[in-house]
Image: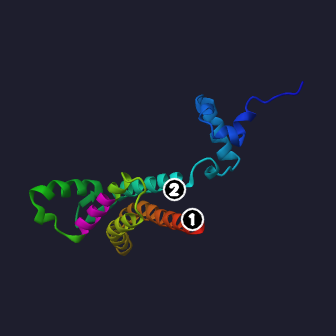
Amino acid sequence: MDYIDPIEPLFTRTLFKKTAYFNHPTCFVFYFFKITFMQINVSEYTSPNVSGNMKSKLLNFLLIVTSLLGYLEWGGDNHIFLFKAEAEILSKLFTDPLSVLHPFTLLPLAGQIILLITLFQKKPGIYFTYLSIAGLGLLFVFMFAIGLITTNFKILLSTFPFIFVAVLMIRHQRKLKQGETNKM
């Protein structure tokens, strides 16, 4: 009698598409092992539009989070993280709107609001994403330049996460657009 591996059916393509095999927790571990260590293309098992949309939403979420991590220092002992500054701006926006009326406060805030809107869209809009990256990027490129000129490494290093995620997002959007043109 031949030996039959009980795990082998989990690694066949036809059984991977059935959800009944993922009811047991160990099946997920084997699925993860196969994708991770055997370099299986995940797009064989998922729809490319779904994974592309989810990656876009994840990158948009990371853009929001990394935009809150910026750090500013100025004259004397003044310093603030952007999430704290944004909380102050939002509180003053309704009480004294003229005090927050400046392009470096309104454009990044509008960019974050637009990114937040894209999280709730079925397919995140490319133009909304680019517009929000431009609004937030204006502030972060300016902060990056200030960090370089003043050799303030705290400011400089606080801009890297946003710039990195923004570059990843632009590359992802171009790849999605290139994939759509190849299908036609």
Q: Which residue is mark 2?
A: 52
Residue 69 in view here: no
Does any portion of residue 49 appear in the rendered image? yes
Give the overall secondary structure of the magenta segment. helix
Residue 113 as seen in the image, left or right of residue 95? right
- Going by the numbered disc 1, the residue's amino acid type is Gly
Return the disc, 1 or 2, that comes first in the chain's sequence: 2
Label 2: how many Cα within 10 Å (few below 14, some 14–19, many 20+): some
Q: Is residue 77 magenta?
A: no
Residue extent of the magenta highlight: 104-114
What is the residue that sits farthest to the front in this orientation?
Answer: 184
In x, y percent, where is residue 117?
33, 55
Q: Is disc 2 placed on a helix, strand or loop?
A: helix
Q: Check the image and report above or below for 108 versus 49.
A: below
Residue at 51 percent across and 51 percent down: it is 50
Closer to us: 80 or 140: 140
Quarter-of-image position of residue 83: bottom left
Q: Position of residue 5 (x, y in %)?
A: 78, 30
What residue occupies the far right of the structure in this picture?
1
**Residue in the picture at 36% in, 73% down:** 145
Color theme of the render: rainbow
Horizontal side, residue 130 vs residue 24: left or right:
left
Do callouts 1 and 2 mark residues in contact (Cβ within 8 Å)?
Answer: yes
The structure residue drawn at horizontal position 23% and vertical position 61%, both measured from the top left corner, is 78
Which residue is the site of mark 1? 179
